Each structure stands twice: as C-alpha cells, then as structure tokens.
Image (cartoon, grey):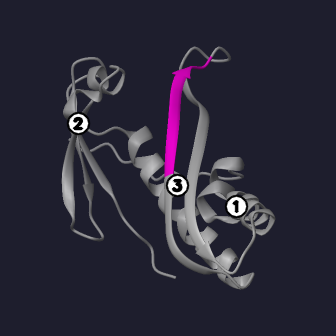
Amino acid sequence: MPTRTARTAWDGGFEDGTGQVELTSSGLGTFEMSFPKRSSDDGGGVTNPEELLGAAHSACYTMQLTAVLEKNGGTVRSIETKADVSLGKDDADGGFKIHTIALTVRGEVEGVDDATFQQAAEEAKTGCPLSKALASVDQITLDATLES
C-alpha cells in the first residue's frame, strides 16, 4: 500500500500564529488554520486537526463498513458517516487531548437485516485502520531537524 503525505507550515507563536495544512499526495488543496480559530466554537472559517481527523476517520470507517456489509451479503446503496471529534483539556498534563469521537452512520443496504447491519457497524468500528490507530499507538517516530 502507498504512503500518503500531508504537510503543515506554521508562522508565529502558538497563540498568535497561523498555518496552512497541505494535502500533498493528492494535491487537492491547502487549508488555513490557527489556534484561536481552532478553539473557537464556530471554527472561524479555517480547518483544524480535529476536523481533518474526523474527515479521515469517517472516510476510513465508511469504506470498512462497506467491505464488511458486502462480506455479509449486503448490497450497499449509500452510507453516510459523521464523526464528531471533541478536543478538550488534558487534566493529566495540562495540555489538550481528544476526549471523544462520536460516529453517526446511516446506510441504505439491501440484503441484510438490522441485526446484521448493527454487527457490521460494530465490526467496522473496531476494524478500520484509523479506529485501530486511534485506539492505541505503540510507537510514534520523529525525525526532527532545526534549520536556520
């Protein structure tokens, strides 16, 4: 499987800085971000890591659910998944952490009953690669270079 790449460029400090996140592999776009807008209720018209994580998780989950449903004899007509990602204070270290991710899924599927759909939805929740990554990360590597 290929490696996908995104890049972020940041100017300024944490509270007053701004940045851009680029979807490098696909070339689909570069999106503005800032911490004050990240922590605002309306998002300030820019993206943030939680929204990007929600987009990635909902996409991954939907693909996994489709595969599980097909494996169980279903014919998927449509699946719509929403991921609500909640960022909040981390009382353990004083920083921030993701407290919850709430997945909401609606599907039109022929050939499966509600029990099969519910079972497939649960299997997809634990089986999609991003769910696995978010459940526990055994190792995160870092290659950091300070350039002048």
Q: Residue type at mark 2?
A: Val
- Residue annotated with mark 2: 46
Residue 17 placed where, x, y %? 21, 25
Q: Residue type at mark 1?
A: Ala
- The residue under the point 59% across, 40% down is 102
In this view of the protein, which residue sits in the foreground, 22 or 70? 70
> With 62 as the anchor, is 136 left or right in this view?
right
- The residue under the point 57% across, 47% down is 104
- Residue annotated with mark 1: 121
State the extent of the magenta-drawn residues as a range: 82-90
- Residue annotated with mark 3: 57
In this view of the protein, which residue sits in the foreground, 94 or 108? 108
- The residue under the point 64% across, 64% down is 128
Label 2 – label 3 distance at C-alpha: 19 Å
**Contact (CB < 8 A) between labels 2 and 1?**
no
- Residue 65, by quadrant, is bottom right
Verify whether residue 87 appears in magenta: yes
Image: 37 above or below 58: above
Residue 58: which numbered mark, if any? none
Which comes sooner in the sequence, label 2 or label 3? 2
What secondary structure is the stretch in magenta mostly built from?
strand
Q: Residues within 10 Å of mark 1 (few under 14, many from 20)?
A: many
Q: Secondary structure at mark 1?
A: helix
